[in-house]
Amino acid sequence: MKWTVADVMEVMEERYPTFLQESWDKNGLIVGDPDQPVEKILLAVDPVEATAAQACEGGYDMMITHHPLYLRGTSFVSRLDYKGRIVHDLIKSDVALLNAHTSADAATRGVAWALAQAVGIEGVPFDPVDEDEAGNPRGLGRIGELPEPMTLEEFAAVVAKALPAGPHGILIGAPGGDLKMQVQTVAVSGGSGDSFLNRARELGADVYVTADLRHHPASEHLEAGGPALISGSHWATEWLWLPHLADDLEAAAKEAGVELEIDVSRFVTEPWHAHMPTLG
């Protein structure tokens, strides 16, 4: 027995229902034939030329990414731009492309959940929108308690160890510059997290772990008293979800009596390629 692209879409919809996506977002099948058989799937954060080439050259039938290829739509898919080249290459190689973006951010075992697990908390969503069939709340972000309090500096070391290696590393911000402050209540949100700065404060977090924090929002947030901030990279804070997605897809396939090979891409699809401290 083999699954088709449509079967994989059904499994993904069960775990990352499209009604969870934000109104501005795009989630679903981007390229591919729903009737195509699937035996081998590649998982990645970004649908970029490197991951598309990995899928095409590696003999994969399908690639599932977190980010959409076309968030704002397009009128052209020629090979004159890199997204058009990706579409052409995937079609020529019979590789379907599907994504789960904010639907995965808010899911029970989604991006925020995976980041929370990695830094040592179970956590609940910032503002639950509903519950899954097992009664687990779903929604963006997670907030929870560490088993024991520790200093911000110690907790930052936990985060640095949990995130996959890349050129970005983490940045740490503390109200008053106090890296020895005690933290126990932790808020997390994978990817760009500016919009949840106030919510993390309202929920009583001691520290907020996210990515892509901009200068002025972060500065004003810390001047207003915090919570402390740990900013990783967008890619790293979201990549942590992929191994859990692989486990869940493998479990679903096993339950259905289907043989399915699933691999997680290790390509670091950061926009940055090196980090150098400034010395002037």
Image: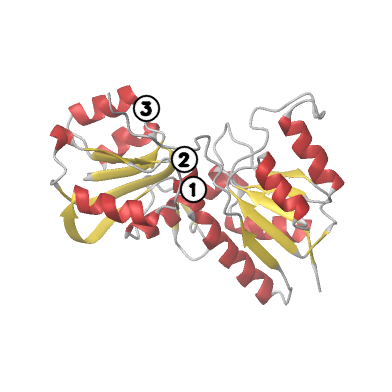
Percent position of residue 111, x then y: 48, 51
Query: Label 1 belongs to which residue?
Result: 238
**Residue type at mark 2?**
His
Tell me what residue is drawn at x 29 percent, y 29 percent.
Answer: 218
Percent position of residue 62, x then y: 74, 54
Instruction: Count numbered badges in the picture.
Output: 3
Q: Residue furthest front?
A: 280
Instruction: Assess disc 2: are there few (<14), some (14-19) or many (≥20) residues with their C-alpha within 10 Å of its C-alpha.
Output: many
Percent position of residue 246, x then y: 59, 63
**Alpha-carbon distance for marks 2 and 1?**
6 Å
**Alpha-carbon distance for marks 3 and 2?**
12 Å
**Residue type at mark 1?**
Glu
Tell me what residue is drawn at x 13 percent, y 46 percent.
Answer: 181
Which callout, 3 or 2, points at the residue further toward the start of the chain? Answer: 3
Query: Label 3 belongs to which residue?
Result: 214
Contact check, label 2 and label 1, Cβ < 8 Å: yes
**Residue type at mark 3?**
Arg
Tell me what residue is drawn at x 71 percent, y 69 percent.
Answer: 260
Contact check, label 3 and label 2, Cβ < 8 Å: no
Query: Label 2 belongs to which residue?
Result: 234
Left or right, residue 268 beside residue 260: left
**Alpha-carbon distance for marks 1 and 3?**
18 Å
Left or right, residue 238 beside residue 229: right
- 15 vs 174, nearest the viewer: 174
Instruction: Assess disc 1: are there few (<14), some (14-19) or many (≥20) residues with their C-alpha within 10 Å of its C-alpha.
Output: many
Above or below: residue 246 compared with residue 276: below
Percent position of residue 94, x then y: 84, 51
